């Protein structure tokens, strides 16, 4: 018994002395390993008288338990010390400025989107977002797009597999216009929102990618006119393209969700020095059917809406010629067209 007490103290001392996990494991093996001191003593119990075996066995178990607990505790302590040391050694000062040759760049699409949102933000627009997966009502029906409209046909729209409850299949939204519907359904006029986001169409060439981005605008109040629409878009384009004399042209067009509708062109000098009109967005006065579909009384309220492709305006502003390059993640392209944080608007 005395020996056992001594052994316990000796082993405990070893445990506390272990200054790293290897040493601790050594100590564990010495005590509790296959050939460990306590293990061997346990084996010897078999040769004892039953009475003696019982008392010594109990004592041994207590010692074993004490050693196990001490081992666990020491292990945790050593691991904590280890972590604290590593945290100290690997400390990073994240407040330091980036190194000059730092490789990170802001994608030109993010840059274009940020500056567009900043401009509309200053005009008092609120940012709204909607899901990429939309229902048929929000993407088409509420927007006065009849069942036979070509935009609904399979070659343009990505449909999700039909669900079993017989409802129309969900779609990957083909434009950001459903955010107009979502907004009008849960908010009463006055409304002044801008909705950026991803949109999807089954199309692929130098000017079309299956996923692209749009910004949608919607303003509804009692006396909003086409004049407000023109003023707002002119102001936006001049600020965005950083040209106070930029010329815009409103051309009559057709969209099911606006009446009257227009497409807007800007007068642009191409790389051969020639001026040309380039279309950048669609817009119009929100169709009374759309207001009604969204629970807004068209005899009391009216307003305008517009939608533009972010890739389109980014390509013009930054001189990018192939739309597909936006999504190829080619580092040489990103280095050339990307923005440093200190260049941000
Ligand atoms: N949703 C249209 C498209 O994707 C763009 C558009 C046109 C949006 C006119 C509007 C609008 O809000 O009034 O082609």
Image: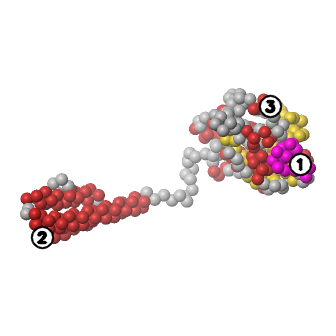
In the displayed structure image, the side of residue 148 where residue 160 appears, left or right: left
> CA separation, marks 1 and 3?
24 Å
- Judging depth in this view, the residue of 184 and 342 nearest the camera is 184
Quadrant position of residue 338 = top right
- Here the colouring is secondary structure
Give the labeled residue for mark 3: 149
> Badges 2 and 3: C-beta atoms under 8 Å apart?
no
Is residue 322 something one can see in this rendering?
no
Q: Is residue 334 above or below residue 56?
A: above
Give the labeled residue for mark 1: 298
Quadrant position of residue 256 = top right
In the displayed structure image, the side of residue 290 where residue 48 appears, left or right: left
Q: Position of residue 295 (x, y in %)?
A: 82, 49
Sequence-wise, which precedes: disc 1 or disc 3? 3
- Judging depth in this view, the residue of 57 and 342 nearest the camera is 57
Residue 211 part of the magenta segment? no
Span highlighted in magenta in the image? 286-300
Residue 293 part of the magenta segment? yes
Q: Quadrant of the N terminus?
A: bottom left
Give the labeled residue for mark 2: 1
> CA separation, marks 2 and 3?
95 Å
Q: Secondary structure at mark 2?
A: loop
Q: Is residue 281 above or below residue 187?
A: above
Residue at position x 19%, y 60% in the image: 31
Is residue 185 something one can see in this rendering?
yes
Other-residue count near label 2 (Cα within 10 Å), few / some / many at <14 / 14–19 / ≥20: few
In the displayed structure image, the side of residue 16 where residue 329 appears, left or right: right
């Amino acid at each position: 018994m005395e020996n056992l007490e001594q052994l316990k103290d000796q082993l405990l001392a070893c445990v506390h002395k272990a200054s790293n996990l290897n040493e601790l494991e050594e100590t564990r093996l010495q005590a509790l390993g296959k050939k460990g001191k306590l293990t061997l003593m346990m084996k010897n119990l078999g040769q004892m008288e039953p009475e003696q075996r019982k008392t010594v066995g109990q004592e041994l178990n207590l010692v074993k338990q004490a050693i196990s607990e001490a081992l666990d505790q020491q292990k945790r302590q050593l691991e904590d010390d280890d972590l604290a040391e590593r945290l100290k050694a690997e400390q990073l000062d994240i407040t330091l400025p980036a190194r000059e040759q730092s490789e990170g760049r802001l994608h030109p699409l993010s840059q274009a989107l940020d500056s567009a949102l900043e401009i509309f933000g200053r005009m008092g627009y609120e940012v709204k977002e909607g899901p990429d997966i939309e229902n048929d009502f929000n993407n088409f029906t509420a927007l006065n797009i009849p069942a036979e409209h070509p935009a609904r046909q399979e070659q343009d729209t990505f449909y999700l597999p039909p669900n079993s409850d017989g409802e129309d299949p969900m779609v990957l939204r083909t434009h950001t216009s459903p955010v107009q519907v979502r907004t009008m359904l849960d908010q009463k006029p006055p409304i002044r929102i801008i909705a950026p986001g991803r949109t999807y169409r089954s199309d692929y060439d130098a000017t079309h990618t299956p996923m692209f981005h749009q910004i949608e605008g919607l303003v509804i109040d009692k006396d909003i006119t086409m004049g407000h629409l023109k003023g707002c878009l002119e102001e936006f384009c001049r600020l965005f393209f950083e040209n106070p004399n930029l010329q815009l042209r409103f051309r009559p067009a057709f969209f099911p969700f606006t009446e009257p509708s227009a497409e807007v062109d800007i007068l642009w000098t191409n790389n051969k020095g020639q001026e040309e009109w380039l279309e950048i967005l669609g817009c119009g006065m929100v169709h009374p059917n759309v207001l009604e579909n969204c629970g807004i009384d068209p005899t009391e309220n009216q307003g305008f809406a517009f939608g533009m492709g972010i890739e389109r305006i980014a390509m013009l502003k930054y001189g990018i010629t192939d739309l597909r390059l936006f999504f190829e993640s080619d580092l040489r392209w990103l280095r050339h067209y990307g923005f440093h944080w200190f260049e941000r608007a």
